[in-house]
Amino acid sequence: MTGLASVPAPVVLAAPAGTGKTTLARRLVSEGPNFAFSVSATTRAPRDGEIDGIDYHFLDEARFEALIQGDALVEWAQVHGRHWYGTLRRELLDRAERGHHVVLDIDVQGARQIRERVPQAVLIFVMPPSVDELVRRLKGRGTEEPGEVARRLESARDELSEAEDFEYVVVNDDVDACLGRIRGILQAEGLRVARAAALDEQVESMRSEIAALLQDEYGRTVG
Ligand code: 5GP
């Protein structure tokens, strides 16, 4: 035996927009068979190349509101003071049942709700390496107008102040290095006693085996 099976845990990656967390989340999922991406619902319009059901579930406000009323969302928030985004309960449950660690790419308001409602979640805050780099990435997308870049910078300023409430923080200076840090966190989390599946049965079975050995080989009876 080299390790115990561990209970799958939702992994929350939260960061200001432009930090590159979507790339990190997608890479984590594409490189590890045990990971699945939680596809969020949103009221924002698809960007070029985005596919409904893969990048997001794109909905109008009435349908988003119906999800809230139907208790279908685990968390939801209005991000950058504009559009609504939310994590579907079924994305978390279905994928966890299949043994996947579900990766959530959400904002800090959503992360706060997950912390309260899903205590087994692992919360990781991703920091941009510098303000220059953050601005470069926000402009580099080429999809946002200057007003939108300014709006996202305002959000980033607020979101950075939440980093201290997270369990882990990683700097995304380089995607591969940052992914290595995230995998390290998840590896250690998987070894926590609280996450070990059926630990008590394994412990009891080893203790019985030792008791039988003590009896048979050493003539000692243990209680
Ligand atoms: P974008 O519009 O650039 O795809 O995402 C804008 C922000 O919304 C990002 O910070 C992203 O992580 C966040 N976001 C995406 N999905 C969710 C979600 O389900 N819930 C919350 N709270 N935020 C989300």
Image (cartoon, rainbow, N blue to C red):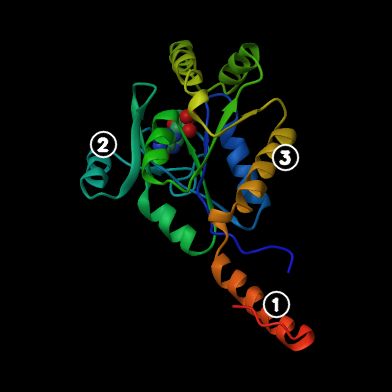
In this picture, is 82 found above or below 105? above
The amino acid type, in three-letter code, at marker 2 is Glu
Q: Position of residue 201 (x, y in %)?
A: 56, 72
Instruction: Categorize mark 1 by other alpha carbons within 10 Å: few (<14), some (14-19), many (20+).
Output: few
In this picture, is 68 found above or below 21? below
Question: Would you say the residues marked 1 and 2 are in contact, meaning their CB atoms lie under 8 Å apart?
Answer: no
Residue reaching furthest right? 217
Report which quarter residue 62 is drawn in. top left
Query: In the image, which is nearer the foreground, mark 3 or mark 2?
Result: 3
Q: CA distance from mark 3 to mark 2?
A: 38 Å
- Tag of residue 61: 2
Q: Tell me the SS state at disc 2.
A: helix
17 sits left or right of 206 in the view? left
Front residue (pair 184, 192): 192
Q: Tell me the SS state at disc 1.
A: helix
Q: Position of residue 103 (x, y in %)?
A: 53, 46
Instruction: Categorize mark 3 by other alpha carbons within 10 Å: few (<14), some (14-19), many (20+).
Output: few
Cβ of disc 2 within 8 Å of ligand 1? no
Q: CA distance from mark 1 to mark 2?
A: 62 Å
Front residue (pair 93, 135): 93
Quadrant in which ligand 1 is drawn = top left
The amino acid type, in three-letter code, at marker 1 is Ile
Question: Would you say the residues marked 1 and 3 are in contact, meaning their CB atoms lie under 8 Å apart?
Answer: no
Q: Which residue is mark 3?
A: 180
Whether residue 16 is visible, yes or no, is no
- Tag of residue 210: 1
If you read the primary sequence from the N terminus, does the residue marked by circle 1 or circle 2 appear first?
A: 2
If you read the primary sequence from the N terminus, does the residue marked by circle 1 or circle 3 appear first?
A: 3
In this picture, is 144 found above or below 8? above
